[in-house]
Image (cartoon, rainbow, N blue to C red):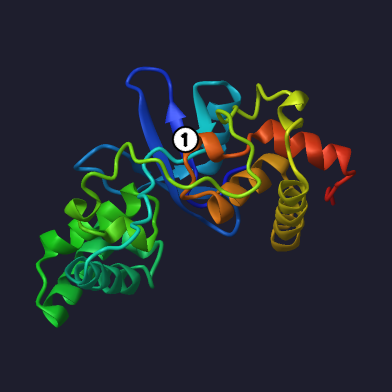
Amino acid sequence: MFLHNDVIEYLDPPAHLLRILWIDDAQSVAYTFTLRCTSATPRSMPLHVLVADVSARRARLLLTDPCRAPRADAPSGKHLLLQTKAWDAVTALHRDVPQLYLPRPRAAMLAAYSRAHAMSVATLMRYLRRYWERGQTIDALLPDYANSGARGKTRAASAGVKRGRPRHAATSSASAGTNTDAALRALFVAAAAHFAATHPRFSRPAAYRQMLRDHFADSAPGDIPSYGQFNYWLTRDSIDHTH
C-alpha cells in the first residue's frame, strides 16, 4: 500500500505530516519523519499501524508531496558547491540504513564523519533533516537562499498534460479523463507496466504515485493528471497487471 517517500497526513489533533523514509523488505516496519518539525528525528512504526490509520480515516495518503523541494533552474556555482558537499555527506551516511535512523548508531556515524571531514555534527544533522524534510532528493540540499523568490512562479506545463486540480484517489470520477491525449494515455500505460515489472504486487494508486514522482515532480499543480484520468484510461485501454 505504501511506498518509500510517501507522505501521510494525520487529520485528528494534533494534525501532522509524516514522510516514510524507509520500509523493510518484509513490509512490517517503516521509519517515518515528522515534517515541518525542526527537532524531528526518524522513528520506527509498524507498517500495519499506518495502514490501519489510513483505512480508518484517521489519516490520509497524499498523492502529491507538499514539502518536496522544487528543482532549481540554474543554481549558482557557489550553491552547487554547497549542495555537492551536503550530498556527499548525506549519501555516505545513508549507506547504512536503517542504522542511521537509530539514535545511538546515528550519533556514532555523525561523529566519525565529522572527524574525517572536519564538519560539525550540527551541520551534518541539518543536512539530514533537510534531506528527509524535502523529499530525499539532491534538490533538497540546495541552500535555502538558492530558491528565494521561487514561490509563486509558474513552471512550464508538461506537454500533453490536462490542466485541472489533482483529485484525491477516493473521489476521482471517470469523466476526469475526457481531455487526455494520446501521449498522456501512452504514459499511463508505460507507468503501469513499469510499476508492475518492478513490484511483486500491482496497485493502481501506487503506480499513479510513482508516475507522479517520475514524470511530474516539477510540474505546477494544474499540470498534474488526476488519479481519475489514470484509472479511467487504464480501464478503457484494458490494462490489468493484477497478478
Query: Which residue bears the numbered disc 1?
Result: 8
Q: Is residue 179 left or right of residue 25?
A: right
Residue under the point 38% across and 70% down: 96
Q: Neighbour class for label 1 at 10 Å: few (<14), some, many (≥20)?
A: many
Q: Is residue 205 left or right of residue 2?
A: right
Q: x, y (%) of residue 54?
A: 55, 28
Q: Is residue 108 left or right of residue 212?
A: left
Q: x, y (%) of residue 217?
A: 49, 50
Residue under the point 28% across and 60% down: 141
Residue under the point 73% across and 38% down: 180
Residue 95, above or below 137 = below
The secondary element bearing badge 1 is classed as strand
Residue 2, above or below 56 = below
Q: x, y (%) of residue 132?
A: 34, 52
Which quadrant is the N terminus positioned in?
top right
Which amino acid type corresponds to the residue marked 1 in the rendered image?
Answer: Ile
Say which of 216 and 12 sits in front.
Answer: 216
Judge whether residue 48 can be spotted in this image: yes
Say which of 112 and 38 sits in front.
Answer: 38
Quarter assignment of residue 87? bottom left
Judge whether residue 49 can be spotted in this image: no
Q: x, y (%) of residue 121?
A: 13, 64
Quarter assignment of residue 127? bottom left
Say which of 119 and 82 sits in front.
Answer: 82
Residue 18, above or below 176 = below
